[in-house]
Structures are given as structure tokens and as C-alpha cells.
Image (spheres, rainbow, N blue to C red):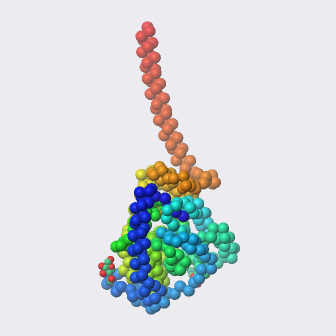
Amino acid sequence: MMVHIGSDGMIRAAHLLLLAVSVISVEDNDMEKGTNTHIKPVPRPKDSPIPGRFWDAPRNCNPHPYTFTRNTDICSRYRDIVLLIAVKTHFPHIDTRTVIRKTWGAKGLNSNFNVVVVFFFATPKNVHTQRAIEREHRKYKDIAQEDFVEDFRNLTTKVMGIFKWAQTYCSNAQNVMVTDDQIVIDMYKLVPYVIEHSGPGMQHFKLCYLYPCCTRVHRSRQTKYGLTKEEYKSNAFPSYCSGTAYIVSLSTAKALFSMSLQTPYLFMDDVYVGILAAKLNFTFLDSYKAFAGIGNTPSLMKNFMDSKYLTSPIMIGITDFDYRGKENYIMKQVWSHIQTSHSKEDEIEKNVVVIYEKDDGGKDMASWSELSFLNFLELGLIACVLVIIFAVTLNRKSKKSANKLV
Ligand SMILES: *[C@@H]1O[C@H](CO)[C@@H](O)[C@H](O)[C@H]1NC(C)=O
Ligand SMILES: *[C@@H]1O[C@H](CO)[C@@H](O)[C@H](O)[C@H]1NC(C)=O
């Protein structure tokens, strides 16, 4: 998949890219020493909210003894890859995967920079589900599946698997994005963003919706996602990036994986990565402005479809959990809007295909027909007012001319 940016932008981007490549290779050499061996964490700051057991843990206390039973050679098809987008998914989300493959994740979308999209699965307990995954893999060849049990409590294992996969099967990638399957990415903005943020003195997490230290820990009594005191003793989390999406360089991903081998497991994958980052003294670029949430609530949608609103976000998360099952529909609409606004902006060349397909579900149309109904109502009102004004004027004129005649 490639991304188009105007010719000026292209030259600028190419320069930045060269810069990024040279910087990253230096960074890689530095990291080589630490890869998959023991890395000495920085001393634990006295005010760190991270419980001590995560810091001073024995080597290999959290091994990753899994293998990829389904794999894709997608990275070997390119020489250089600007960005590997690793999508955390599981089988039931087949509809949103289909949308991603047809929209922002489509192959050949753009023609200047290589971005690859890979879907990461664990192994389902159900044999039929496994067969379905295999069918999906045969069809699209963009799946990597590791042999641990699929469960939300194993999400951290999945993310470590992504870091491991990146360094093993995609070592020609400069950057790795970890994201999920409920998101629309404005690829036209993302690639220039990544290139611009790959250089000397850049933060380790270059795209990040940051929860700064020290957000409060929810306990297991309160929610299914809560933690027990045994799992996490202190009452606050360190700084961490929302698991919705973040980007790190490949060498950062390698270091995070290595550090995970000597850091006890915690099922909240984003918090866990924050713990690893703290032990490595890694830094975050809080790019919360690149993120927007969108739901199926008509007012939210209407607000979002304002073209001014769309100029800032790159990552648009589908967040309205009251409308489960409609994510795919919202994603298609948002993507269609992104394409429209970009083609207006810089007249995208004809080789960029508009992949949006007509929606098939009549039911999904509800909120949209409501919107257009409102628009019709507005138009109708304006028309009524115009007709009345016209009628009154006409009436006056005809009275005047009648008076003249008399
Ligand atoms: C951690 O990084 C900061 C810069 O971000 C630096 O000032 C500090 O010395 C580092 N700490 C250690 C222990 O390396
Ligand atoms: C996570 O995966 C491991 C390895 O397959 C498995 O033993 C464990 O039961 C899984 N955890 C959950 C909560 O399913």
C-alpha cells in the first residue's frame, strides 16, 4: 500500500525519509547489543507509581514461548517499509477487517511509500473458528496467528507477539504501529506524519494518545477490566499511550520486547507497555490532537462530517459502544468522507481508487436518512419563506398596477 502526497510534499518527504533511514540505522546499531539479551532498566525513580515487583524481576520471568502457526510474507515483498500497521483483532470482527481491507488498508492505495497492514490473531478455542481464520488467511494472506489462547486477558501477549513478529519477519520496517480494528486511519496524513517524526531527538512513542502519570487504577470489584492488589499493588498507573494506536520505531519495538522478558505479566496491554517504557526511560510525544472519536449518534456524526473538523485528526476511533455492530458502517462513511475531502484538497490523481462501496444494509441507513431528512426540512423551510416573500411582493405589485389602472 502506498500513500500519495503532492509533489512538493513528496520531495520534502523523501528528504525526511532519507534522514529517518540514516537515523534509524544508527539507532538500530545501538540497540543490537540489547536485543533479546538482558537489558538493564534505569533505576526506579522514587516517585514511580509502578509497583517494585515489575522493576526488579528476574531475567526471563515472563518468557514468550509461542510460535506463529499462520504467517504472511508481506514484508518480504518490499525493500523498505515506512510503517508496519499491526492490527490487534479477533475472529468475530470479520466485518471491520473487511472494511479495513477495502478502505485505509487497501493494497495499492497510494504509490510513493510502503505501508503494510497485518492482522494479528491468537488461537481460538473453537475448531470451526480456527478453520474460518484459515479460510480468511488463504484469501487475503495478511494474517499472523500465534499459538496462545485468544482471550482479552492475553492481549499483552499479543502485543509482545507483534513486537517479536516485527523484528523477526518485518525487519525492513522502520516503524511499527500497534492499533485495533475499530479505527479509521487517514493514510494521506499519517505517512507524512510518521516521516516527519522519524529523526534525531524524537520521542520513542511518536504517535500517542497519552494518559500521563498517574491515572487511578480501577479495581476488579468495579469492572471486568479492573485489577486485583496482587496484580498491581499501587493505586496509580505510570504514563502510557492508549492501546487504540501508537507508533514506535522498530528498534524501540525490539527493546520493548526484550524488556518484557524480564517484566512480570499484566493483562492491560497499554499499561504494560507503559511500564516497559518507564524501565527503558522511553519518552512519549503526546499527539492527542491526531485522535478523534466518533460514534453513531447522529449529532456526533453531523459534527464530524463538518469538513473543518476533519482537518485535524489522523486516527479516528469508532467509540460509540452503544451502537455495537454498526462499526463497519461508520468506518465506511468516515473513509468516504476522508477521500472526498482529500480529493478536494489536492486533487488526487486518478490512480488513487475510491474504494468506498455502497452500503448493503438498509437498517444501517437510519441515522443518515435522519440527517438528510433534516437537511430537506431546512431546504423546505427556506423554500417556503422565499415563496411567501415572492407572493407578498407579487401581491403588492399587482395591487399597485391595479391602482394605476384605476
Ligand atoms: C531519562 O531520560 C531523560 C531525558 O528524557 C534524561 O534526562 C535522564 O537522565 C534519563 N534517566 C536515566 C536514568 O537515564
Ligand atoms: C492465555 O494463553 C495461554 C497460553 O495459550 C493459556 O494457557 C491461557 O489460558 C490463556 N489465558 C486465558 C485467560 O485464556
In this view, the residue in front, 235 or 48, is 48
Q: Split into 4 quadrants, where in the image is the N terminus?
A: bottom right
Q: Quadrant of residue 400?
A: top left
- Name the residue: 43% across, 79% down: 28
| Residue with the most extreme top position | 406
On screen, residue 53 versus residue 368, left or right, reads: left
- Name the residue: 47% across, 24% down: 391
In this view, the residue in front, 80 or 231, is 80
Q: Is residue 358 visible?
A: yes
x, y percent for residue 384: 49, 32
The picture quadrant for ligand 2 comes to bottom right
x, y percent for residue 115: 51, 67
x, y percent for residue 112: 49, 62
Q: Is residue 316 visible?
A: no
Picture layout, residue 79 above or below residue 300: below
Picture layout, residue 194 above or below residue 342: below
